[in-house]
Amino acid sequence: MLIHEFLASHGALPDQISPEDSLKALLTGMELGLRGEGNIPMLPSFLSVPAAVEPGAVCCVLDAGGTNLRTARAVKTVSGWRLEGLARRPMPGTEGEVSCAGLYGALAAPVRDLGNFEKVGFCFSYNVTMDRSLDGKLDFWCKEVRAPEAVGQPVGSSLKAALGEDCKSVRVLNDSVAAMLGAGDVQVGAILGTGINVCYLEQCRDIPKVPGNLKSDSMIISTEIGEFAGFPKSDFEAAVIGASDEPGSAHAEKQCAGGYLGDVISAIWSAAAEAGILPADFRNRGSDLVFVSRALTGEETLPEAAAELARQAISRAARIAAVLCAGPILKAARSRDTVRMAVEGSQYWRLTGFREVFHGCLEELLRPRGIRCEIVRQENACLIGAALAAFAEEM
């Protein structure tokens, strides 16, 4: 059986995703989300364009991502932000289940290692319903973090309590929001890594579900776009979704993000071995995206049929991700013809073959609408964004 026929029979070809049809459904879902309806959360951040922070200001910043926890001391200088004592460790809950107290104790430990801080900026890469105090309650976990007791608990207040009385405030923001703030003059922030999320600047008058007496006219919306469930699912994507900890959530994320794409490729390889397309030892072979990426550049050895199946899976994921970014870009465009988007994440910057397909599909969606997208990269954008949030005033 030919690879094309095999993938088509399982609904797994890239072109079995219609970007235009999917985008229309996505935009409708985003509008529903702004009203508090539908399955795309469209979470208000209660953050807008930040006010200037005076040189000499100091805070602690955390970036709790899908894989790693990063911490640093952030110092505002005349030329920007300086990060001191930057450290990385596994995200609590990714190496076994932890209690709520254990989670926040593990998050607080590296902060205390850096000293005592009155202000903390906490970039938190999970679904949180924020309030105007810049704290919020965790709605549910994704990216396979296991800390069920923490669901429903306030994120900032819990960390503040774990840090003790020296800490006066913890400001919470999503990773895409942090990337957008940290990159400067951009209208969209995107995370394309272990998970996927996109944020953009929206006018408060167009967000029916927020209060009408806010201090700002605009607000960054953390779309939680990975919750979109409108893409057709291949047999392999459906299997990965079904085997995940929360099979009812984050369908689009599980179809395209790096934390799940390796499992999708493994499922494809296993079925291809059953069909005689690959050797029998691919039936239960795991797929590490770093290895796959290196194999696609010739740095590792992989049978050509296995490499081609992986290329097709990456291309399909890139098309899905492009649609998920196109929706917020169009929402942010308004009267603009160029939208600047800050992008963070190893899938976008390191996965062989992903970026080229992503850009091609994004241009295919935006060009007929008279919009172009400029990609921006800022080193440590999430940590810088968290530092800015640490000094933000309540909206």
Image (spheres, rainbow, N blue to C red):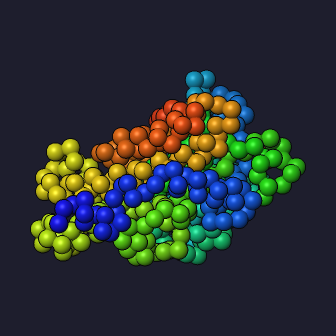
Q: Depth check: 265 or 286 in front?
A: 265
Q: Depth check: 189 or 22 in front?
A: 22
Give the quadrant of residue 276: bottom left
The residue at 25%/66% (across/down) is 6
Give the quadrant of residue 340: top right
- Is residue 5 visible from the viewing direction of this image? yes
Q: Position of residue 111 (x, y in %)?
A: 55, 52
Q: Position of residue 237 (x, y in %)?
A: 39, 67
Q: Position of residue 319 (x, y in %)?
A: 42, 50
The residue at 22%/54% (across/down) is 308
With respect to residue 64, does 72 lie above or below?
Answer: above
The residue at 58%/48% (across/down) is 327
With respect to residue 343, does 269 lie above or below?
Answer: below
Q: Depth check: 144 or 162 in front?
A: 144
- Is residue 389 visible from the viewing direction of this image? no
The residue at 71%/41% (across/down) is 48
Judge from the rendering whether residue 96 lies leftward or rightward of residue 181; answer left or right.
Answer: left
Toward the top, the furthest residue is 78
Which of the image's four quarters has the N terminus? Answer: bottom left
With respect to residue 245, does 5 lie above or below?
Answer: above
